[in-house]
Structure formats: structure tokens, C-alpha cells
Amino acid sequence: MSKFAQGISFFTIMLLALTAATFASGQMTKQPKIELSHDQFYFGFMPMNAIVQHSYWIRNKGNDTLQIISVKPGCGCTTAPLSKEKIAPDDSALLKVTFDSKNMVGKMVKDVEIFSNDPLKPSTSVRFFAVVNREHDFVRATPNALRFSKFGAKDGRMVKALDIKNGSNETIELKVVELPADYVAIDRKAAKLKPGETATFQVEQTASVTNEADVLTSLTVEFVGQETDRITIPIVAHLQK
């Protein structure tokens, strides 16, 4: 065999060996990878003895099934049901975090820890913040909670007015940043208010109202001026099962 042929044969063997090693390595590194849509949320100012809610998405950016082993809220005031525990590659699951501010006052910081089979990140967490039992100094919502019931409803539905007043001495911009679209609709999601002005939002319950099941959720509004802050309005509804 010529030296040229020997060289080609050696090169072919090395190339095949490298390809096999790469394939084997790829097989060995097949694993899930957890990713969160975001890991923090600020409710802003909210009433005491109210229930508010925010959703996070858990995504699997790996190439193997992501198994959520457990979800552990930091205290009994928080629940965090997950839409599914097994998440295929490029799929996601919804984590609905619900916070009950019963008998609480002041600034709150709460965590929910998530345990999974991601070998590089077996545990991660989401966090939320709130200021309980205090109205904001300048931006006020009336009412401070929306309660839907069958009384006064038309065709099983009800529309309520939500007034948000700018009591500051500067122009602010309002934006709805959290809305439970499964249960309510709103006629607009933004407004610009001069000092002393009030914006009225029409909030409609989009499911039939009955006394069969309570739904406890919330609506969060962010306002921007010289400072940025938020208020959250709890929503209580009776929805048909």
C-alpha cells in the first residue's frame, strides 16, 4: 500500500472515530433544561385580606423530558398549582401563584421553590413582592376590589367600573400589566392622566355568573411618572362550573 493510500486510510479511520465519539457524546448529554419566563413579579399596593394571582411559565429548553418533581411555596399564604409535571422539549407549563394577604400588613417578599430533573439546575425559584394594607400615596383605585355576583347581572354577566385617580402633581401613564383573561375583559389597557384626572375602566366578567364556584384572582396596573409603581385590584367572582 502506498504512503498516500495509507494516509487516506488513517484519515478515514480518525474521521469515523471522531464522528462516533461525537455521536456518543451527544447521546450522553441528552438532558432537560429548565427556563422561566421571568422569576420575579411585583404586585405593588394591595388590600389586606385579599387574594391576588400571577402566572409564570416554565419552559423546557433541553432535548429530554423535564420532570417537575415538586413545587414548594415558602408559606401557607401561597399556593402554586402547575398545569403539568412532565414538560417535553420546547414545551412549557403554567405555574399559577396565588397569594392570600389575610392578617398581613406591610412589605411582603415570598418565594416558591421549584425542583426538577435538570442536572445543571435541580432547584430554582420564583419570587413576588407586595405592599399590603396600604393605599398608594397618590394613585388610588375605586373600588379597591372588584366583586362580581349574580345579583344585578345581565344574561349571567356583569360589567363594573374601575376608577383610577392621579392624585399627584405630575402626568402619569397607566398600563394594565396583569389581567385574568380567562375570566374578565377590559375596555382598554392604558391611559394617560394629568394631575387630578381619573381614568374609568370598564371591566366585564366574561363567564356566566352563578354561586357554584368562587374564582379569586386580580388585576395589576402599573403607572409611570417620575416614579414607577403598581397597584393590584383583587377580583372575586362566582363562575359557572
Image: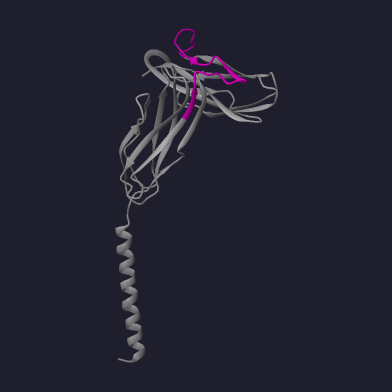
Closest to the observer: 176 or 223? 223
Report the residue at 34% width, 87% height from top. Answer: 5
Image quadrant in which the N terminus is located: bottom left
In the rendered image, residue 76, in percent from the top left (x then y), is placed at: 34, 24
Q: Is residue 97 magenta?
A: no
Position of residue 213 measured from the top left corner of the image (x, y, whole percent): 37, 16
Q: Is residue 173 above or below residue 65?
A: above
Residue 232's x, y, as percent?
52, 23
Judge by depth and name the residue closer to the eye, 109 or 233: 109
Q: Which residues are magenta?
A: 129-156
Q: Main secondary structure of the magenta part?
A: loop
Q: Residue furthest front?
A: 106
Q: Give the answer, above or below, for where 110 lies relative to 197.
A: below
Left or right of 107? Residue 27 is: left
From the viewer's perspective, is 144 left or right of 53? right
Q: Nearer the viewer, residue 146 or 88?
A: 146
| Residue 89 in the figure: left or right of residue 133 | left
Residue 236 sits in which quadrant? top left
Residue 102 x/y as whole percent: 41, 18
